[in-house]
Each structure stands twice: as C-alpha cells, then as structure tokens.
Image (spheres, coloured by chain):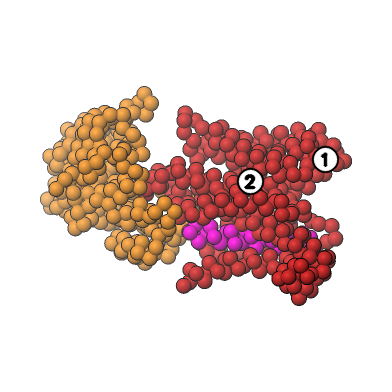
Amino acid sequence: MGMILSVKDLSFSYGARKALDRVSFEMNPGEILCVMGPNGSGKSTLIDCVLGIHKPDSGTLLLDGKEVQAYKRQEIARHAAYVPQNHSVTFPYTVREAVMMGRTAYLPAFGAPGAKDEQLAEEAMDRVGISQLADRPYGSISGGELRLVLLARALCQQTPLILMDEPTAHLDYRNELKFLELVSSLSKEDGISILIATHAPDQAFFFESTGCNVSALFLQKGVVASKGRPGEIITESCLEGIYGIRAKILESDGEKTILLQKSL
Amino acid sequence: MKRLRNAIILILLPLVFIAAALLVGRYSISLREIIETIIRPSAAASENYRVIWYLRLPRAVAAAMCGAALAVSGAAFQGVFRNPLVNSGLLGVSNGAGFGACLAIVFLGGGAYTYILAFVFALLAVVLSYFSGRVSKVTTSVTLILGGVIVSSFFSALISILKFIADPYSQLPSITFWFMGSFADVGYLHFYAFLPMALGMLLIFLSRWRINVLSMGDREAAALGVDVKKYQFLIIGGATLATASAVCISGTIGWVGLVVPHIGRMLVGNNNVRLIPVSMSLGACFLTLMDILSRCISTAEIPIGILCALIGTPFFVYLLKKTRGGGWA
C-alpha cells in the first residue's frame, strides 16, 4: 500500500527566518505520528505545509502520492482534514451545521449540503459521541465537546489523513483521555492516519500501549532531531536535549510515563 | 416540499408589502380601481394611472429591492469578516457614495449625476480600501477592515469640505436630505441600478454556504476546501455591487444592513443557507413598510433613514428579549 504522506527535504521560511529545514518523514495508512518539540519548533508550520496553506521553499511533499501544491484547494481537503488548536466561535451555528462544514470539500462551486451530507454529519457525530448535542449552538458547549465537534467535522471530510494541532490543549484529564482513546480507535478501526502535534510525549506512550501503529518525531528549530518508535526515542537524555529539562521515565503496567523534575 | 413552501413564502411576503404600498397613500384609490389600473392600464382614469404606475409602484419596488440588497450585503459582510457588528458600509461604500452624491449636488447641479457619481465613488471607495489594506502583497480580513475604516474617514472628510463650500440655502439641504435617505424621486430610470444590484445579490445567494465556512476563519476555511481568496472576492464584490446600487438610489440607510440580518438570525438561526434568503425577504418587507410610513405618517415626507432607526430599534429590542438572542446570549 502506498504512503499517505511522504515528506522529503522540506524547507520553509518566514522571510529570513527558517521555520523548517530539510524535514523528511513518511506516514503509512492507519499510522499515528506524534510530532513534538518546543514552542516555535515548526510543528504548526509543518501542518500548514501539508494543508497547502504554505508553499514550501524546497523539497517534496506528497499527499497520497501527488505533490500537494499540484492539487486544487478542494482536492487537498478530500485528502487531509484539520483539527485546529484554537477555534473562536463567532456565529453560534448548531453543532450539526458546524460538523456539516466538513462536507464543503465535496460540494460543487455554488452548492450547499444536502440530505446525504446531513446523514454523513449524523454518522460523524455518532462516531465521536456527540449526537445528543446536534441541535445545540456550538458556542455554548464545553471546551472538550467543542474539540469533539471539530473532530467530527474532520471525520465528515472522509479523508485518509487528519492533522491535529495540539488538540488536547486546554482539556481536563478525562476529556483528554477520551479524545486520545478516540484517536487511537480511529487509527486502529477506521485505518485513518493521524498526524498529531503535541506537547505531551506521554500521549505517544499512550498510543503505543493501546497497540496503535505509532511513531514519534521531534522537531527542534525546524530540524528533525529524532524519529522512531516512541519507546525507543523518547528517552531521558532526549528530553534533556530538546526541552532542556531533567525528567525520569517511569514504567507501570506496561505503560511508560514521564515524571518532570527540573528545568535546566 | 417544506423548502419549496418556505421559498414561496419568502418571495410572496415582499410582494404583499408592495401591494400594500399601492393601496395606501394620501391620494385615495379603491382596491377595485387599483386592480383595474394594473390589469388594463389603457382603460384606467389618467390620475389613477399616474399615481399607481409612476409614483407608488416604482417607489415600492425600489424600496423592496434596496432593502433586500442592503440586508443581504450586511449579512454577507458580517459572515465573511466574522464580525456581527459590521454593516455593508464597512468598506467605505456609504461614505464613498455620499461623497459622489455631494460632488454631483455641489458642482453638477444634482439630478441624474447624483446617482451615477454615488455609484462610481462607492465602488471606488471599496477598491481603495482593498489597496490601502494591502500589506506586502496580501490583504487579510483585518487589514481590509482597517483599510475600509481609513478610506471611510477620508471620504467623510471630503464630504465635510463639500458641505463647507456648498450653498447653504439650496445645496446644503439637498446634501443633508440625501444622507437621511429617501425614495421620493424614484422613477423607472432608476431601475437600471437593479442590474448590478441583482447581480451582486445573486453572487451572494449562490455562495451562501461558503459564507458559513469562511466565518470559521481563513485558515480553517482553506483546510475545509474553500478557495478563500476566490470566494471572498465573489462575496465582497457582490455585496459591494448590491450596496452601491442601493445607496445610489436611496441615499445612505445603514441601519438595514446592520440589524435586519440579526433579526433574521433570531428567526431562522445562523446558517447562511437560510439566513441569506431570509435577510433578502425581510429587508425588502422592512424597507417597503418604512417607505409607506415615511410618506403616510405626516403631510411632509419623513426621511426613511430616520424612520428605520426610530421604529426598527424598539422592534429589534423586542425580538432580542423574546428570542433570548437566539443562541447569542
């Protein structure tokens, strides 16, 4: 089976500031890739490049075997969906309407969603467990629920790849765990590839312990510092090198976790 | 079936108001006479014929069209700029048109020039806003709004200069009345403005689902598969054409574009697929009704801009309380 995403020597700069420097990696169908690194290391920029929002300065970026920049806007949205880090609600659309926006990728130039799109929205809401919220204004639900709405919207796009930018930031323990379980099952059961930018290496351990096909990739100042299986590359010395912290990696019931100790 | 029924209601409703506009007025004509005049114009009494065909009908139709255009442009601008507080004058349309109209009144003796210059300068103002907001080859929503505010204030200063040099006994009152808005002088010649107006409304109507998606923010809209630049151009362009044409007929009536879309939201929700047609219909009904009142309340015509705010505001507050803000609060 072909690669969902194949990135080779990708570089991008904002003016004179280099944000990504010869980044290379690949993603298989159903694989989870945890992209980690300190603030400003280029995680969001990488996502923007995959979405075709930023045009790379050099390198290749193949989405389903084809150069991203060669796709039309709407075609990209049929291959990769996006769950943003922050979403500000301006107009209180109903949850159903917000989820249905994911169908835009399949609508003709001046079209509006029809009964079939509504059906798919219902299924997406059902999949993430927010059907009971369908008619609520999506501005008056909790932060955890909003995250699920955005995930359902991405599922509605029916893409083989979903990009998530720190989706669990601002979530409490339970909501974070619920979200991660959902991501894990989307990868295992639905075969969706998920690129997830995160600040928590613990999440990579979580995916590993739930039996996902998961890889981790550390970015540091736009350069790939290391990549591989989470259990192999997330080490105490790696955390020290990348984040400048002293931490211990503990293991309990077969799952690893990180104990933060001191900033260096 | 339900959608067809709703569509018919939305189209019929303004027609009812236009029909009502034919009925009422200081010169009284009975319902039977009106129907006769409409069906067989050749056989009608010449007085009735003139009042119906040359005064009330063009006026009511113009009010309905302008109401629809202003309301729908307001709704479109609010969606595209993700800001529920803006109206269609946002990008300088109103002040641009105002300057064009003043220019015509002061230097060209008013008349047909007023409409033409108002239209031209309204479009010009938006183009200027676009280029003022352009920073290093891109225009984002924020810089575009900023450009609009700047250009608006620039034209507002120019308007002040013209007011300052205008003849205080003839020209200054004309200017003042133009800004209060009126359909008193509308004739069939003005119907030419319906062409750009209808085109603009059509563009917005066709893109109405995309307005929803654009209101998610440029980045998310792009990720959802919307060519942001293309649709912004279509929608802002459409709204500009519609507003400029409306303003050149009626003078500035900013209230409609700001408030009617919100009334629509309280009634049918935020989805622009429904909100856009509903705003058109409501705007048409509202402005037709206001025009009826403006010529019937007193012997002297009351400028329609005044009535919109005076009557519309309490109505808006009532709706706000009744619907509890429709998801806003």
Q: Provide residue B202's location: percent of width, then percent of height.
A: 53, 53
Q: Residues within 10 Å of mark 1 (few under 14, many from 20)?
A: some
User: Would residue A86 be seen by someone viewing this image from the given angle?
Assistant: no
Magenta range is B269-296
- B281 in magenta: yes
SS class of the residue under badge 1? helix
Mark 1 vs 2, N-terminal side: 1
Query: Residue at 80% of width from left, 62% of height from top?
Result: B50
Q: Colour of chain B?
A: red
What residue is shown with label 2? Answer: B244
The chain to which mark 1 is attached is B
- B227 in magenta: no
Q: Colour of chain A?
A: orange
SS class of the residue under badge 2? helix
Query: Residue at 61% of width from left, 62% of height from top?
Result: B282
Residue in the foreground of this view, choosing between B115 and A50: B115
Q: Provide residue A38's location: percent of width, then percent of height.
A: 29, 35
Q: Residue furthest bottom?
A: B32
The overriding secondary structure of the stretch rendered in magenta is helix
Amino acid tagged 2: Ala
Q: Which quadrant holds residue A37?
A: top left
Query: Residue at 52% of width from left, 52% of height from top?
Result: B204
Q: Which quadrant holds residue B265?
A: bottom right
What residue is shown with label 1? Answer: B171
Q: Residue furthest top?
A: A16
Residue in the foreground of this view, choosing between B135 and B111: B111
Q: Is residue B50 left or right of residue B95?
A: right
Q: Which mark is residue A62?
A: none
